[in-house]
Amino acid sequence: MLYQNIKTAGSATAVGTQRPVGLSVGYGTRASATHRHFTNGDLTLTNNPLDMAISCDGFFLLPEITIPTDAMSISVGSDGIIEIAQFGQDEPVQIGQLELARFVNPSGLNALGSNLYQRTTASGDALIDVPTQSGLGQIDQGYLEGSNVKVVDEMVT
């Protein structure tokens, strides 16, 4: 189905407020507001130490964390602390910590594609903190999150 965006999330209404969600028209059907549901999908174990999923609420941020070339292994705790084991070292070395973000109205985020989203006035500012704090989820290392779409439910709807 082909959609045309009529109103974007965060655009002004006639009464001076902002739209909390966008409005799209699907050709061959009627106009409707479209909502993204950011509920968790099923987690799939990959055992890849660089695969990570968030259990519960949050979006990944992109801090610059450099993994040294002599790292033998990498460990990411549920709180986002990143540690590596290096040859000749008895104790792991902390090299950084992941941060997560959440929004008052995640449905108001602008979808950029490739699972990337952009803040809008409708989504509100990002609350940024470390995993497991401020209502943010925990990090699950070695997992990937699958789609949260339930195909049969959506077809019936």
Image (cartoon, helix red, strand yellow):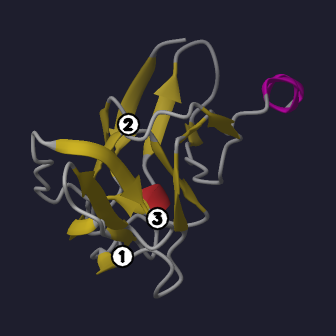
Which kind of residue does numbered mark 2 sit on? Asn
Q: CA distance from mark 1 to mark 3?
A: 32 Å
Q: Which mark is residue 127?
A: none
Q: Mark 3 highlights which residue?
A: 58
Q: Mark 2 highlights which residue?
A: 115
In depth, the one of 123 and 90 nearer the eye is 90
In depth, the one of 143 and 8 nearer the eye is 143
Q: Mark 1 highlights which residue?
A: 15
**Nearer the N terminus, badge 2 or badge 3?**
3
Q: Quadrant of residue 127?
A: bottom left
State left or right for residue 93 relative to residue 57.
Answer: left
In depth, the one of 51 and 27 nearer the eye is 51
Point out residue 47 in the picture as x, y percentages from the top left corner.
55, 34
Which kind of residue does numbered mark 1 sit on? Val
Q: Which residue is at 14% across, 56% downward?
A: 65
Residue 109 can be seen in this image: yes
Q: Secondary structure at mark 2?
A: loop
Point out residue 125 in the picture as x, y percentages from the top left corner.
27, 76
Pick out the residue farthest to the bottom: 134
In depth, the one of 76 and 105 nearer the eye is 76
Q: Is residue 83 above or below residue 133?
A: above
Q: Is residue 156 above or below residue 148?
A: above
Which kind of residue does numbered mark 3 sit on? Gly
Q: Is residue 143 above or below residue 107?
A: above
Q: CA distance from mark 2 to mark 3?
A: 13 Å
Q: Residues within 10 Å of mark 2 (few under 14, many from 20)?
A: few
Q: Is residue 36 magenta?
A: no
Q: Which residue is at 30% across, 62% downward?
A: 83
State left or right for residue 102 relative to residue 155.
Answer: left
**Nearer the N terminus, badge 1 or badge 3?**
1
Q: Is residue 27 above or below residue 128?
A: above
- Highlighted range, magenta: 151-156
